[in-house]
Amino acid sequence: MKFTEHLGAHLTPEWRSQYIRYEQLKDVLYGGLEKLPPKDENPDSVIQGHFSSFEEQWFRYCDEELEKINTFFAEKIAEAGRKYTTLKNELHMAGSLKVGPSLSTLATSKKVTLAPEPSKKVKVKTNKKVNHLKFAFGEFYLSLVLLQNYQQLNFTGFRKILKKHDKLFETTNGADYRKEKVEVADFFVNKHVDELILNTEELYISELEDGNRSKAMKRLRVPPLAEELRHGDWVSCRVGFLAGLFLMLSSVATITAFFTDHSGEFDIAIRIYRGVFLFVLVTFLLAVNTWGWRQAGVNHVLIFELDPRDHLSYQQLLEVALLLGVLWAISLVVFMFNHVLGIESYSPNLVLVSFLFLFTINPFKICYYKARFWLLKVLFRIFTAPFQHVGFADFWLADQLNSLAVALLDFQFIICFYAHDWHVTNPKDMICDGTLYGIRPLVACLPAWFRFAQCLRRYRDTKHAFPHLVNAGKYSTAFFVVAFSTLAKSESVRNDHFFMLWIVAAFISTCYTLTWDIKMDWGLLDKKSGENKFLREETVYRSKAFYYFAMVEDLIFRLLWTLTVSVGELEIFHSELLKLILSVCEVFRRFIWNFFRLENEHLNNCGQFRAVRDISVVPMETNDQAFLEQMMDDMDGLVLNKRTGQRRRRSVMTKSMKKISSKTDGVVIKRETEVIIENETLTSL
């Protein structure tokens, strides 16, 4: 593998701009070689003059790269040192609660040697504290590994480019530069990262895992960057087999549909199989999304806050999607041959849906247990949106549900159908297709409600009316669309004023959501886009045409609802088939949306050079955090007032730290905090 490819595969995406620009330096080398006058046609003095001029320019570029890397490394190592001190202090604060040789002992021990047995409530709090500390140390350890990798890659890049320089120009200047500047550069000689890694391991082993080194290192160790799965070949083999099986079964079901009589069952069959198919399609396209993000260097693992040591790859997602697709196709084939097999028409789908439900909530640690558990946790936070903190994964998945509104309605129909309509012979007695008790409109509003509630929660947490309340307004338009649509269809459409209100509400919703997609979610149409006209200043994907295509595609697919009014209401085309086609288009639109939404989030992380999750084990209120940020922005952290500056800082800081101390799971540090703040004030002034 060429070093350019090796660098691209192993670098930390959020720090991409801070690595050695190996490819550009290589282009400079070859450009300089081409510009050198031919030896046969020019005297040595001319050639030497050109070579000296090029060398001066070349090593100036090297100096700039070296300075950039040293500066970034110094910032990161200082940040790592501060973080280590913070975590160590928090560990010691939590350690004041322990009754044994380690925090792990406190979390699991039932016998107490130095104190009475703690109450159950204290034990629960301590368990949470220990788990949070483990999580924070794990993320910090990952950041140290990334920084160590940063050192190694940059030194290797300098060594290789300087060696290439000496080989092309038949000189030893590159080797001399490496010895004089690169090998003594701070980013290379500084071993503080190695010390921090060892110290973190020792703390984690002794304090959080009760001396169990193998268990601790199993949780801390990070697999080599860009390493393929150990059993990647087997996963690929299974994916190929399942893909072939799915195509064969789908072909059989399609051909059989033309030669078997299912009159009277066609509409119901579409509705009970469509929802499962849409979820299978979403999973498949998510696998493609994951592959695309990985190829472009978009760190979806960080954005979704997944475990970097254990998460599903795009191959595994493909395997899951195709496995579900095969089960869906088998059920469909059995439905097609139900008369031959002598079974009830709709029983295969009941078995399929029941199996998928049990598969998802299966508590046993098999079949990607951690991924299923993560999905269920996120879904729980979505369903309880107003009462839960909202993270990126929460509102991203809720947005996916907004594109699966038809699938959710189909699942509501499935439950109702098997509970009531399955064995009803008179069509007039069937209730699942109507708006009885307003259940179907309510289900149709659920995805928009989830996002609406999340936006309100985000506003409560941040107090920022923009963008959260404005975003909530976007989702509220869906309530009017559903309401007017339901009222319009309850009577004759042509004579009902609700029909016009439905059209107006749908048009407003379309304009609102389209603008938000392109401007806010994707960050496009930026005034400072420079050469990237109508886009943004920085882009990740190589082709600009991809961005323009996405904007046009989003516009077209957002307007496809007009077909339900024209083609659907006039019954020019089968309504259930039309819904199937439109819902597939909506899933595809969301698939494209995912690429640019995560790209925009990734660029925000890149702007902050954020490569790992920032975990703090001390809860902090919004007001406290805002004050501390303001204090850090001011010189020496002082909130100055000509006469009362010292007293103000001391009193406010003490008050703020008292609040924080009261939230550290019962660790009382009130007196110590006052002393520290007082000493710091006296020293600073």
Image (cartoon, rainbow, N blue to C red):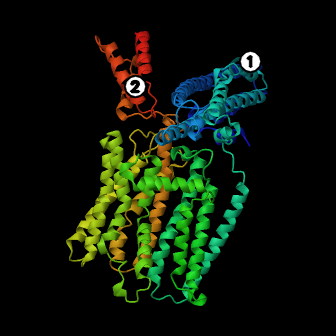
Which image quadrant is residue 423 in? bottom left
Q: What residue type is labelled 1?
A: Ser
Q: Is residue 655 above or below residue 552?
A: above
Identify the residue at image location x=46%, y=56%. Answer: 379
- Under mark 2, the amino acid is Met
Count neighbours of disc 2 (C-alpha within 10 A) and say few if under 14, some if 14 to 19, many if 20 or more: some
Looking at the rendering, in which quadrant would you find the C terminus?
top left
Q: Please give the name of the residue rendered at 56% of the width and 78% of the height, measured from the top-left corner.
A: 332
Instruction: Depth check: give the residue in front, 245 or 122.
Output: 122
Q: Position of residue 400 (x, y in %)?
A: 45, 58
The answer to which image quadrant residue 496 occupies is bottom left
Q: Which residue occupies 36% across, 17% down?
A: 650
Q: Horizontal and vertical percent for residue 539?
A: 50, 43
Mark linked to residue 237: none
Q: In this view, does 659 lie to the left or right of 13?
A: left
Mark 1 lies on a secondary structure that is: helix
Mark 1 and mark 2 residues within 8 Å of each other at the beta carbon: no
The residue identified by callout 2 is 657
Query: Residue 21: in sight, yes or no?
Result: no
| Quadrant placement of the N terminus | top right
Read off the residue under disc 1.
45
